[in-house]
């Protein structure tokens, strides 16, 4: 395998696919940028097989597809250059298959000599295409949903077989390996790497608790009689707190993904209202995430000029007690902004009470907001200290690479997906 002191590493992502989501760019670029700072020979690869979005997309699916990827490629190139990775990226446009970035010969050379591929969020279309690389690591950023998809018999076979191509598996759900969802798999805990030097408090600070989120991100899942829903299911529970915490202001920068068919059964917004209209009626401030946080700088400014974060988690994360903690919340911490966030079980793996404040009910949410407001300076100092201790990219990525290159394979990891009883997939270990 070679020494972990200096490796050739390929990291995947979705930066070009989402040119108007600043948070997505930060989520992915902090991996290659952080690894480069550690001295590794790093390259970014985007080969998701998913059509890229247009910056000016409309209401229909057709209008949102970037049949010409020029703007998407320019966005990716700009992000890479900003972090010293100008000649270190590869993007495969899937609609009319074509590669951008590294020339063909150089791309082939990099992919045939790399030591490690880190598949962040499982974004690769066909990981088996990259099996020349000795070690493939899967980063599960969507715990519970990932594990449920591995168990379901129908509709997820392609996902299950993509997952099976990897040698070692990590999860942002730090408690998932001890849960009923793990099915004996060796899920290694990991966290979101944050480039601390890029995140600092900014002034003037707005006197408002904020977050950036999508009402829904994809369809809910049903498994063994239980629904695993999206943030719409959780926000519905907390609509009344905006009125209860006045004069404190709560604001959501709302993304555009809110398809009715994706909403959790029983929690659709009533009366034909959009999620934004429903939130405003309940006393929330609502911003358009595409304008407030659409680029790297806009997203960072939105986070760093907030007083603190307040946010719910996806219903599935909460129901599964996964221990998931948001990459967005980690950036708030790094910017010295306290986070008041719904507990997914992370309180068993991260210190809470100052800087990170967890809640599990509307009453607790109100109390925690008031506490952060009353002891703000103390919470803000603790926030930055927690970021340095638990999310610093140097620490997170050093451990990730060491474990990924340890040579031990998860037991079991699926090799063949077979039809099992009661609507479940049976996972056959190697």
Image (cartoon, rainbow, N blue to C red):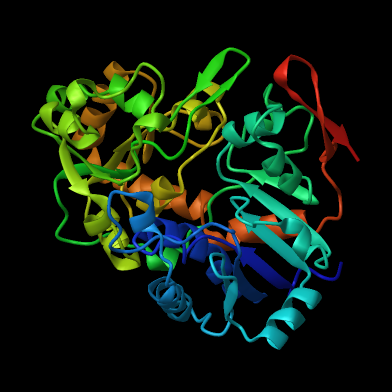
**Residue 272 drawn above or below residue 338:** above
Q: Is residue 13 left or right of residue 315?
A: right
Position in image of residue 221 (x %, y %):
54, 26
Position in image of residue 100 (x %, y %):
55, 79
Q: Is residue 258 left or right of residue 100?
A: left
Q: How many marks?
A: 0
198 or 57, which lies in front? Answer: 57
Q: Is residue 130 left or right of residue 380?
A: right
Say which quarter of the image contains residue 352: top left
Position in image of residue 289 (x %, y %):
26, 51
Say which quarter of the image contains residue 72: bottom left
Task: Write the residue at 64% across / 49% down.
Answer: 139
Q: Quadrant of the C terminus?
A: top right
Residue lying farthest to the right in this orientation: 430
100 or 79, which lies in front? Answer: 100
Residue 188 in view, yes or no: no
**Residue 69 drawn above or below residue 220:** below
Q: Quadrant of the N terminus?
A: bottom right
Task: Write the residue at 43% across / 40% down.
Answer: 217
Position in image of residue 355 (x %, y %):
36, 41
Task: Write the residue at 50% across / 64% down.
Answer: 30
332 or 223, which lies in front? Answer: 223
258 or 372, which lies in front? Answer: 258
**Residue 325 drawn above or below residue 99:** above
Residue 264 in view, yes or no: yes
């Amino acid at each position: 395998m070679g020494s972990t002191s200096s490796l050739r590493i390929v990291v995947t992502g979705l930066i070009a696919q989402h040119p108007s989501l600043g948070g997505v760019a930060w989520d992915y670029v902090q991996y290659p940028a952080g690894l480069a700072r550690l001295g590794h020979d790093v390259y970014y690869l985007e080969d998701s097989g998913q059509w890229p979005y247009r910056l000016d997309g409309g209401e229909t699916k057709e209008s949102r597809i970037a049949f010409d990827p020029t703007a998407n490629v320019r966005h990716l190139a700009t992000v890479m250059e900003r972090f010293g990775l100008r000649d270190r990226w590869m993007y495969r446009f899937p609609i009319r298959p074509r590669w951008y970035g590294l020339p063909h010969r150089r791309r082939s050379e990099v992919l045939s000599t790399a030591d490690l591929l880190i598949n962040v969020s499982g974004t690769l279309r066909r990981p088996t295409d990259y099996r020349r690389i000795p070690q493939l690591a899967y980063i599960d950023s969507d715990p519970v949903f990932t594990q449920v998809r591995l168990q379901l018999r129908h509709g997820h076979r392609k996902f299950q077989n993509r997952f099976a191509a990897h040698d070692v598996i990590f999860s942002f759900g730090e408690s998932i390996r001890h849960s009923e969802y793990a099915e004996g798999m060796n899920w290694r805990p990991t966290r979101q790497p944050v480039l601390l030097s890029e995140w600092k408090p900014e002034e003037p600070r707005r006197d408002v608790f904020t977050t950036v989120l999508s009402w829904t991100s994809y369809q809910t899942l049903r498994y063994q009689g239980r629904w695993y829903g999206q943030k719409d299911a959780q926000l519905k529970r907390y609509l009344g707190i905006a009125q209860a915490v006045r004069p404190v202001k709560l604001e959501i920068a709302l993304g555009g993904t809110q398809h009715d068919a994706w909403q959790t059964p029983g929690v659709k917004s009533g009366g034909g209202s959009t999620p934004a209209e429903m939130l405003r009626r309940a006393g929330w401030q609502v911003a358009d995430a595409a304008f407030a946080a659409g680029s790297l700088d806009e997203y960072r400014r939105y986070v760093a000029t907030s007083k603190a974060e307040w946010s719910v988690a996806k219903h599935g994360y909460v129901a599964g007690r996964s221990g998931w903690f948001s990459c967005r919340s980690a950036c708030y911490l790094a910017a010295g902004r306290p986070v008041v966030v719904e507990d997914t079980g992370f309180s068993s793996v991260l210190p809470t009470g100052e800087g990170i404040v967890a809640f599990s009910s509307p009453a607790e949410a109100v109390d925690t907001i008031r506490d952060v407001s009353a002891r703000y300076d103390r919470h803000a100092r603790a926030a930055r200290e927690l970021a340095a201790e638990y999310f610093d990219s140097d620490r997170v990525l050093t451990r990730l690479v060491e474990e990924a290159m340890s040579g031990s394979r998860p037991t079991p990891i699926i090799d063949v997906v077979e039809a099992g009883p009661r609507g479940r997939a049976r996972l056959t270990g190697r």
